[in-house]
């Protein structure tokens, strides 16, 4: 069935179109609304493009509006400020006026009347558009939209946004009509059938309803059920579509299928972690309270329904269960009263479906060809599967090629109408001869097998070596599907399978011994037991519990052309073989036989000790003898060269030795479970070997040097293996599994394309070398002696798992990989862990204690949180450029033991370096902190947080025995940009042993508790926004240097600043609003430098002249205003001036000027000529020397 029906209706691409102002609601309300809509499977368009100012809406956006069923307009305060939003609104209101589309307004933070009349916030936002040409139509659109029925946040569910959104979703789901179908373009006639099933279902009523969909195979039952499911599943809390119940119940138990339904419907509605075995009763109870939709596809017995949909009370109110089946009796026995019989396609629908599969579209067909086409489709009897296959095959004939059409019609006339499945032979007949034979092999022997196994089995036939299964898939003869284990398997429709069987049987329907392929056990047993074999038989697949091997061997003697033999004996037969059968299987009493034509031989539980001597095996390509009694490959001392053998599987054999020099073209070798194997001679002829499995062997030495093309190597539980020689170049090796060996070292440095490496329980392994590999997964189990693991530059490594104890492992380097998660198990002696440049690493799952870990580098990762409580003795921690890091958990005192810490490039820190140095000649503790604050517009993690947003550059250095009591708080109270300066201030003042502190950038205030920094000697505040210094600064008894540089908002200094008795240097540079220096500065007996360049200071305290050796620096103009003229000297580089004067002379001049004009506070500067030379004036003083430096200025 498919695309539009004969009377199509409009199908929209989107259910909902969201119109909103991005800067108001994109990252909050609209984001949450969009997520809720998508979770309920309501297809929603949300434009996430950033709109440039002045741009108009695009053609693509207009098409999206036109292709939406509903419109949700989120009116916010700034909605009307955007011409883009207003143009969008105009288009929405145009579409709203049609019968098919509906608009709903949401009044988020404005009222309807504000939108309707453009008043309040809306009016303010709209004001900018008053003079624009489109203003009038925008006003009309706003007024019209505001009158529509919608939702107002403040008057709905008390303004709770979450409940408000849920209310919108519930209302919208009711408005989404169930007949608004979204139908696959390749389906025809589906609308009517869906609506008929929906009328049976009655979605919306509270009863629990079971509806059956009945019809013959290939009529479209599953397709119809899937279409209905897709149409209504969003209206249920949980859902499950269980396909192929009939087929799956043969391979897995009904209990497993029941558990699958439980998991699907309950976890879909309530995402939780459960144990199905322990929680089954609880899940059943949960399902009984959940509104669910369940589809059980292809049910063929009532026991399946009793297990999967036993009673209506299993399901919650309003639940619906859809059952598809070929047998109406199954539905009646389960008391299903609502049964829908699938209608086959009408002629018109069949023509439409055929045309789309033959030509990819609906095309006009001439009357002549239309007549012929109707005759062709008449044979299909409206069966969609047959029509689709016919279309795919007849499409190769040009519709204008009349001869091709007529030949097809003639061929169809030979097919009886009652044998509908035979019509599918047209697809088979279009195949080349070899593909026909391959298809019949798949039908009779390989359906349900894995794709890999089927491919290998087919390759054993020389005629199929270059053929591709995908050709059969493209012809719709087979399909590929994933089984419950995740393996890709070969499948096909039942009609196709029956068609293939009929092709094999039809020449001799009553003589199976004349069939080319035998797959029915009863027929095979009858033929073999009665010695009815013939040369006609090419393939046999036998599953038996009762037929003894002697009868099998005897019956094969007449099948000289047999090329495919697959025999499987139940395991219990082998276990008790000598008890069940009294005969002796030794060749001296019984001569086994295999036809020499055999190309493929598989015999599970093979009862003989070797292959028969009479079997030449010249044509043998694949030999698989699993769980057999085979002790040696050939009877006696026979040595046969198997030139064609490519696949050798002797899994769980009793071989002791094997010589591969006799198999020069071998590609795959499997000897897993061969517990007695002690010798494997590779020779020099294994160049084509790509797969080796020698698990559970007793080999001590394995030389793989000849196998240069090896791709996969499995050496599990080789507990005697002490020596392994890999090829010098093994560029094709992709996977290597090793466990329970005695290997001491593994050198894979030349396996640069290795993708998977699993190592477990290798107790002697000390060294693993693997460089620049393509390893994707690495699993290391018990390797207690492993000391070093170096995987650096394994660019593709995504997963590392170390499940057991690696007690001696001290060094791990996995840098420059794609590691996402890893588990390093119990590694108590780990000292070095390097994960730098693991760009995809998102978590650091350290679940055990790592007491000895001293070095940890996780730089350049996506780590969001780091828990360091299990690594108490780290010395070096590098988190450089962990831009996603928002949380750092560390115990109290953690930073004390660190020698180096880097957080540069984290969200809070543009740079962060912590270093602990050993200053042996340092007297007392040394600690230095530089902190630079830079404002940010937004915090990407908390965009709505009202705290100030800052990013910091930080440098912190300490030397023993200093402590860092509060540094971990500075680091870990939050690594996002949201900044609480009170906490930062408290953290800084907790660093009691700081000697140097520099705060730079947009700090709004200085730390209030500076007096706690008892050891502080240098304090610098650079380019800050600080207006006042805290009085606590005056209590820094050891402060020697105070620098206030470019603190442009600083207005005054504390009056008691003079209490800084040890202060030697006071820099007041470019503090342009600073007008006064407190008189107490004259108490600073140690003051040597006073730098006041760029300030507004108008006078100095007179007693400052009593400070010995003081250097006052500033501009020439400023110093002259203090009365210094001839005393001012200029430095050699002509950037500073200095004056040296005696106390008496300087005081005398200064006092004269003050006496001359006692009321003048601003001193006039004499007009001077341009100064070229460096002045050097030295005036002897009796007891005081004053040196004054000034900036060199040009004065006219």
Image (cartoon, grey):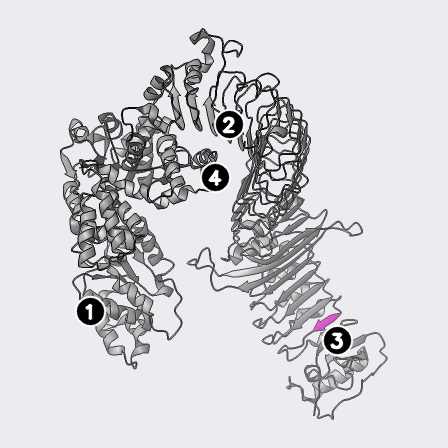
In the image shown, does 42 or 533 lie closer to the viewer?
Answer: 533
In the image shown, does 434 or 1178 lie closer to the viewer?
Answer: 434
Q: CA distance from mark 4 to mark 2?
A: 16 Å
Q: Earlier in the sequence, mark 4 or mark 2?
A: 4
Q: Earlier in the sequence, mark 3 or mark 2?
A: 2
For disc 2, the marked residue is 623
For disc 1, the marked residue is 144
For disc 3, the marked residue is 1105
Q: CA distance from mark 4 to mark 1?
A: 72 Å
What span is in magenta? Answer: 1084-1094
| Rendered image quadrant of residue 9 | bottom left
Q: Nearer the viewer, mark 1 or mark 3?
A: 1
Secondary structure beneath dot 3 equals helix
Residue 110 visible in the snapshot: no
Q: CA distance from mark 1 to mark 3?
A: 81 Å
In the image shown, does 492 or 572 lie closer to the viewer?
Answer: 492
Within 10 Å of disc 2 (Cα), the crowding (few <14, some 14-19, many 20+) is many
Q: Nearer the viewer, mark 1 or mark 2?
A: 2
Residue located at (73% from left, 75% from top): 1112
Residue 631 visible in the snapshot: yes
User: In the rendered structure, are the residues bearing label 3 and label 2 in contact, judged by CB atoms less than 8 Å apart?
Assistant: no
Q: Which circle marks residue 465 in the picture?
A: 4
Q: Earlier in the sequence, mark 1 or mark 2?
A: 1
Residue located at (51% from left, 29% from top): 620
Q: Nearer the viewer, mark 3 or mark 2?
A: 2
Within 10 Å of disc 4 (Cα), the crowding (few <14, some 14-19, many 20+) is few
Secondary structure beneath dot 4 equals loop
Residue 975 locus on image (x, y percent): 53, 53
Residue 1010 locus on image (x, y percent): 62, 57
């Amino acid at each position: 069935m498919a695309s539009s029906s004969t009377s199509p209706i409009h199908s929209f691409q989107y259910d909902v179109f969201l119109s909103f102002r991005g800067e108001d609601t994109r990252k909050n309300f609209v984001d949450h609304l969009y997520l809720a809509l998508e979770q309920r499977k309501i297809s929603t368009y949300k434009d996430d493009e950033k709109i440039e100012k002045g741009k108009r809406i695009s053609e693509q956006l207009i098409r999206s509006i036109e292709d939406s069923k509903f419109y949700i307009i989120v009116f916010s305060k700034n909605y009307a400020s955007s011409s883009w939003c207003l143009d969008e609104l105009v288009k929405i209101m145009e579409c709203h006026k049609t019968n098919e589309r509906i608009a709903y307004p949401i009044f988020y933070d404005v009222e309807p009347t504000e939108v309707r009349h453009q008043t309040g916030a809306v009016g303010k936002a709209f004001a900018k558009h008053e003079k624009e040409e489109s203003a009038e139509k925008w006003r009309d659109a706003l007024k019209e939209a505001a009158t529509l029925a919608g939702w107002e946040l403040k008057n709905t569910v008390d303004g709770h946004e979450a409940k408000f959104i849920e209310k919108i979703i519930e209302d919208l789901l009711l408005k989404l009509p169930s007949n608004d179908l979204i139908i696959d373009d390749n389906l025809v006639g589906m609308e009517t059938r869906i609506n008929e099933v929906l009328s049976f279902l009655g979605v919306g009523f509270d009863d629990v309803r079971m509806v059956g969909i009945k019809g013959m195979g290939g009529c479209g039952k599953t397709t119809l059920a899937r279409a209905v499911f897709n149409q209504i599943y969003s209206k249920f809390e949980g859902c499950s579509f269980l396909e192929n119940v009939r087929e799956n119940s043969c391979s897995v138990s009904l209990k497993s299928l029941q558990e699958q339904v439980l998991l699907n419907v309950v976890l879909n509605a309530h995402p939780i972690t459960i144990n199905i075995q322990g929680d089954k009763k609880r899940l059943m109870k949960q399902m009984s309270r959940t509104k669910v939709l369940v589809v059980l596809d292809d049910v063929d017995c009532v026991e399946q329904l009793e297990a999967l949909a036993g009673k209506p009370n299993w399901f919650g109110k309003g639940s619906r269960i859809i059952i598809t089946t070929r047998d109406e009796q199954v539905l009646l026995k389960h008391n299903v009263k609502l049964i829908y019989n699938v209608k086959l396609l009408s002629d018109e629908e069949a023509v439409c479906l055929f045309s789309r599969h033959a030509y990819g579209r609906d095309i006009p067909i001439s009357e002549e060809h239309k007549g012929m086409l109707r005759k062709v489709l008449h044979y299909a009897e409206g069966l969609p599967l047959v029509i689709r296959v016919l279309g795919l095959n007849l499409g190769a004939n040009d519709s204008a090629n009349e001869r091709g059409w007529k030949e097809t019609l003639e061929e169809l006339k030979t097919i009886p109408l009652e044998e509908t499945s035979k019509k599918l032979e047209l697809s088979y007949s279009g195949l080349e001869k070899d593909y026909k034979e391959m298809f019949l092999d798949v039908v009779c022997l390989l359906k349900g097998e894995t794709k890999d196994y089927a491919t290998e089995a087919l390759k054993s036939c020389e005629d199929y070596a270059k053929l591709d299964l995908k050709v059969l898939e493209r012809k719709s003869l087979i399909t590929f599907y994933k089984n419950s284990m995740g393996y890709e398997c070969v499948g096909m429709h039942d009609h196709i399978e029956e068609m293939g069987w009929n092709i094999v049987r039809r020449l001799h329907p009553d003589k199976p011994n004349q069939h080319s392929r035998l797959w029915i056990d009863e027929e095979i047993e009858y033929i073999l037991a009665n010695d009815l074999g013939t040369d006609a038989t090419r393939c046999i697949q036998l599953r038996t519990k009762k037929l003894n091997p002697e009868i099998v061997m005897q019956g094969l003697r007449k099948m000289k052309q047999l090329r495919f033999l697959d025999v499987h004996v139940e395991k219990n037969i082998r276990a008790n073989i000598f008890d069940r059968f009294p005969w002796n299987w030794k060749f001296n009493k019984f001569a086994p036989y295999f036809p020499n034509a055999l190309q493929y031989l598989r015999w599970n539980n093979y009862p003989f000790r070797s292959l028969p001597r009479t079997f030449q095996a010249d044509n043998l390509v694949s030999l698989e003898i699993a769980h057999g009694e085979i002790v040696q490959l050939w009877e006696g001392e026979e040595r046969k060269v198997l030139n064609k053998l490519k696949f050798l599987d002797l899994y769980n054999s009793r071989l002791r030795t094997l010589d591969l020099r006799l198999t020069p073209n071998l590609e795959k070798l499997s000897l897993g479970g061969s517990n007695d194997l002690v010798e494997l001679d590779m020779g020099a002829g294994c160049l084509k070997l790509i797969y080796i499995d020698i698990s559970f062997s007793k080999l001590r030495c394995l030389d793989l040097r000849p196998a240069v093309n090896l791709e996969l190597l499995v050496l599990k539980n080789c507990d005697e293996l002490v020596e392994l020689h890999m090829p010098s170049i093994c560029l094709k090796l992709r996977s290597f599994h090793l466990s329970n060996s005695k290997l001491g070292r593994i050198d894979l440095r030349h396996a640069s394309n290795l993708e998977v490496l699993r190592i477990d329980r290798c107790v002697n392994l000390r060294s693993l070398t693997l460089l620049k590999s393509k390893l994707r997964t690495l699993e290391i189990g018990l390797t207690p002696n492993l000391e070093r693991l170096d995987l650096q530059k394994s660019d593709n490594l995504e997963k590392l798992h170390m499940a057991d104890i690696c007690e001696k492992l001290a060094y791990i380097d996995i840098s420059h990989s794609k590691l996402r998660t890893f588990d390093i198990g119990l590694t108590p002696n780990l000292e070095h862990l390097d994960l730098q440049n693991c760009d995809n690493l998102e978590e650091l799952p350290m679940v055990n204690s790592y007491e000895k870990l001293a070095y940890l580098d996780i730089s350049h990762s996506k780590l969001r949180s780091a828990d360091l409580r299990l690594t108490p003795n780290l010395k070096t921690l590098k988190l450089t450029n962990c831009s996603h890091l928002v949380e750092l958990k560390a115990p109290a005192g953690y930073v004390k033991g660190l020698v180096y810490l880097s957080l540069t490039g984290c969200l809070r820190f543009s740079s962060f370096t912590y270093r602990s140095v050993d200053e042996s000649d340092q007297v007392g503790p040394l600690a230095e902190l530089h902190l630079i604050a830079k404002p940010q517009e937004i915090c990407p993690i908390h965009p709505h947080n009202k705290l100030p947003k800052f990013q910091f550059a930080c440098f912190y250095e300490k030397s023993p025995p200093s402590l860092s009591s509060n540094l971990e708080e500075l680091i870990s109270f939050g690594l996002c940009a949201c900044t609480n300066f009170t906490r930062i201030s408290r953290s800084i003042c907790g660093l009691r042993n700081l000697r140097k502190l520099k705060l730079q950038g947009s700090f709004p205030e200085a730390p209030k508790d500076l007096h706690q920094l008892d050891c502080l000697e240098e304090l610098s505040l650079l380019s800050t926004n600080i207006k006042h210094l805290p009085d606590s600064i005056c209590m820094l008894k050891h402060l020697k240097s105070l620098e206030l540089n470019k603190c442009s908002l600083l207005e005054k200094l504390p009056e008691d600043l003079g209490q800084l008795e040890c202060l030697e240097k006071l820099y007041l540079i470019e503090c342009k609003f600073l007008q006064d220096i407190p008189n107490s500065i004259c108490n600073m007996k140690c003051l040597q430098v006073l730098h006041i360049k760029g300030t507004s200071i108008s006078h100095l305290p007179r007693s400052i002249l009593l400070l010995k050796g003081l250097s006052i620096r500033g501009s020439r103009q400023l110093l002259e205003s203090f009365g210094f003229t001839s005393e001012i000297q200029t430095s050699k580089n002509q950037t500073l001036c200095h004056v040296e004067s005696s106390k008496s002379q300087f005081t005398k001049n200064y006092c004269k000027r003050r006496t001359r004009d006692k009321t003048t506070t601003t001193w006039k500067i004499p007009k001077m000529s341009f100064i070229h030379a460096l002045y050097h004036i030295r005036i002897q003083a009796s007891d005081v020397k004053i040196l004054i430096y000034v900036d060199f200025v040009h004065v006219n």
